[in-house]
Amino acid sequence: MSSPIDLEPAEDDLEERGWLVTMLRRYRTQLLALGSVVVFGMVAYAIFHLTTEVRYDDIVLALSDTSARAILLALLFTGLSFFALIFYDTNALEFIDKKVPFPHVALTAFSAYAVGNTAGFGALSAGAIRYRAYSRMGLTPEDIGRIVAFVTLSFGLGLAAVGSIALMIIADEMGPLINVDSLVLRGVAGVILGLLAVLLYMGRGGRVISIGSFTLRLPDSRTWSRQFLVTAFDIAASATVLYVLLPESSIGWPTFLAVYAIAVGLGVLSHVPAGLGVFETVIVASLGSAVNVDAVLGSLVLYRVIYHVIPLLLAIMVVAATELRRFVDHPAASSVRRVGGRLMPQLLSTFALLLGVMLIFSSVTPTPDENLEFLSDYLALPVVEGAHFLSSLVGLAMVVAARGLGQRLDGAWWVSVGCAVAAVTLSLLKAIALVEASFLLFFIFGLFVSRKLFNRPASLVNQALTAGWLMAIAVICICAIVILFFVYRDVAYSNQLWWQFEFADEAPRGLRAVLGLCIVASGIAAFSLLRPATSRLLPVSDDDVERAVAIVEAHGIADANLVRMRDKSIMFSEKGDAFIMYGKRGRSWIALFDPIGPRHALADLVWRFVESARTAGCRSVFYQISPGLLSHCADAGMRAYKLGELAVVNLNTFELKGGKWANLRQTASRAVRDGLEFSVIEPQNVGEVLDELAAVSNAWLEDHNAKEKGFSLGAFDPDYILSQPVGVLRKDGRIVAFANILVTSTHEEGSIDLMRFSPDAPKGSMDFLFVQILEHLRNAGFQRFNLGMAPLSGMSKRESAPVWDRIGGTVFEHGERFYNFKGLRAFKAKFHPDWQPRYLAVSGGVSPMIALMDATFLIGGGLRGVVRK
């Protein structure tokens, strides 16, 4: 491996040539959010001009003219569509060969689509909902990633297939609607169908295809066919929801299906939450020449309510019902309740977002004349004016609180309750909006039923909104402005409008509400973007280390003795019976291992760590965590990625007998013939040989052109070495190799950290040292020995494994020039250990590569430490 001096010019060259790529990667999430806002702004401008001849009253009239039969049919087809959506997940689980009880799958899938269709960003996406729910059902992050990939691809490919088939059939009717020649439409549809046919042929029999060093197992023909039928049924049913709401026209259902498929696809590609505006623009532009635009807009409003809002309400009702005690006696209901407890915060978060939008939009739309006349008889004008203005601000507060609800913050719960109660009052004072008030009361009911779920103490004021939430707020503000100008497009603007206060002057009320909304929203955005991050972490105190060591001694996690290095900060639980040790690199707070302490303290400690990092303006990372912590990380909105596998030897069965131990027996015999002698020096006696150990350590560092590491690795620090036993090998009375042994008083687990030997140590010394330490610990009554992690080990390159796993698997196979991945696993494999997966968990939206790079630099002490051995 090259020296640091050789690599410095390469780094400078990279900085000169790759700064743009680095910036794009670092701010990818923010740029994507900004791009979505720009796209929505352009779409809003387009739809505003497409509706030049449409008036607000015409849309209200079109809504009122919708027949009860059409609404009932729309509800029926909504139910059919969501029933089909459940089978996306069941087929995905069958494809990855995992079994989950159907009630759990049904509730998870229904809730995921109810949330994803309504919001569809950040923690309120269908994938995030699945991750939270399925992680508690025993599925690994790899399994959940494959489910999400299967569902996403099957919907995308099915949408393309359905749309293309419909387009091939009705190209002659479709062409005039969008001013494109029918031959061009059939050509495009034919190309898409041809590509899909090739993909279907390649996947026959579950065929595995290779692309470079990656392999991918495609679903077999049976799975493809079954999933296509599910997707086609889903798309057809959801399209019919909108079709039955439209007034009668010359457009047939097949033509409309093609238009609908295109609109949905473009809405998904836009990355705008729920495709808002994009979907509507495509529908209006395609159907506006055949159907009155006011009728189309009225049908779109009803479609959003029936297909997006009602399923969300139904999901909340189902989960709320399981929370009531009288439904929990039956074991099946209790099992569903546990799943529902994972989903309820996200459902209520989405509903809060929806209600906030409703309050904002209602503050910029006119009050029905009969309601306004009634209010003028009983209320003073300032009351009505104030209710309109405050309604928009309360709506914005609910949007902000929605994020906290998804994170189960008790502060967000109280803010949401207060806002909802205030909003009920305001909705009655401003417009006698009974439907609006009913939704708010239902929301309050859901909050109180699930009160115990919101138990995380945190200040909502300290919550910096992420790029996704800022995007959502920007989209809401733009939409409110467009609605305002659309509703009052016949009112000539003048400066006097801002100062007009009359019951009949509704345009000025809307203007003031939008102005207040934009000012407060801008302040929130500025606070989130410009708030300073905290500086360096405070150094750990001697008292904190002593408390942490006492916890380590009581819980038998040998690696946790790394807290004795004093190079990491420590965060204790509220009761002081558990702790997290962590370091800071760049904007990453990186926790090492699982929290140490009793199981009941883990969830709150994980949340406190994530929340503290967020408050400091940093991202949270957990490094080398066990599968048992994944559900807690999912609750905190983190995503997990496999790092490798931990090698653990069962000392109860360890002995050098049998054929599989032949190589180690020969190594041990040769070491004895070479004159090597093993002994364990207890901590109280290590000081007598400390200088000799230091000489071996320095010689090893010099011979390997290495420097001391940190964080997840110990260094030759005298206080650290003196705190634990040391196993040594002597030749002719001189120490030639040593390893410090990490143990606890529980005698559950042992491990080693520093493993160093002099250049003249006989070959095989380290193997012999390991064998002797294992036998020593076994004889001392220890249960297991932790050999440490083999990075990137056990990461799949096959089938539908996540991209992270396939990249890791490829690096493991072909990355020997950078790191001895295979050699390290092969060394550990000599001891026939059990392999246990270990993960990297990062805050939602953060690239795992950034987090892993920060962890690597933290371990190596910067770039120089990383490039040196």
Image (cartoon, grey):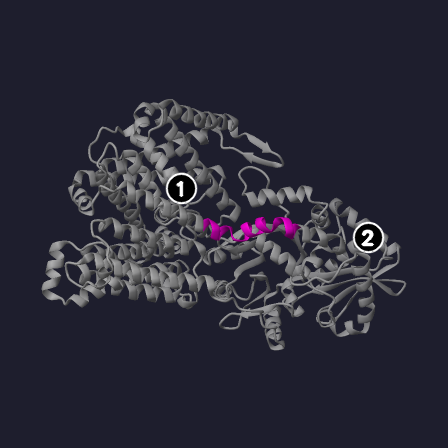
Q: Is residue 54 magenta?
A: no
Among numbered discs 1 and 2, the one appearing first in the sequence: 1
* Residue 463 locus on image (x, y percent): 43, 64
* Residue 834 locus on image (x, y percent): 64, 50
773 left or right, relative to 462: right
Residue 212 lies, with reference to residue 123, above or below; the image says above
* Residue 502 locus on image (x, y percent): 15, 62
Residue 310 lies, with reference to residue 720, above or below; the image says above
Count neighbours of disc 2 (C-alpha within 10 A) and say few if under 14, some if 14 to 19, many if 20 or more. Answer: some
Asked whether residue 509 is in view, the answer is yes
Q: Is residue 26 magenta?
A: yes
* Residue 141 locus on image (x, y percent): 51, 48
Residue 268: which numbered mark, if any? 1
Asked whether residue 103 is in view, the answer is no
273 left or right, relative to 302: right
Amino acid type shown at disc 1: Val
Residue 704 lies, with reference to residue 96, above or below; the image says below
Q: Secondary structure at mark 2?
A: loop
Q: Quadrant of the C terminus?
A: bottom right
What residue is shown with label 2? 764
Residue 84: which numbered mark, if any? none
Residue shown at the point (30%, 34%) measured from the top left: 286
Bounds of the magenta span? Answer: 14-33
Look at discs 1 and 2 and give the one toward the viewer: 1
470 or 810, which lies in front? 470
694 or 619, which lies in front? 619
Mark 1 touches mark 2? (CB < 8 Å): no
- Prevailing secondary structure of the magenta residues: helix
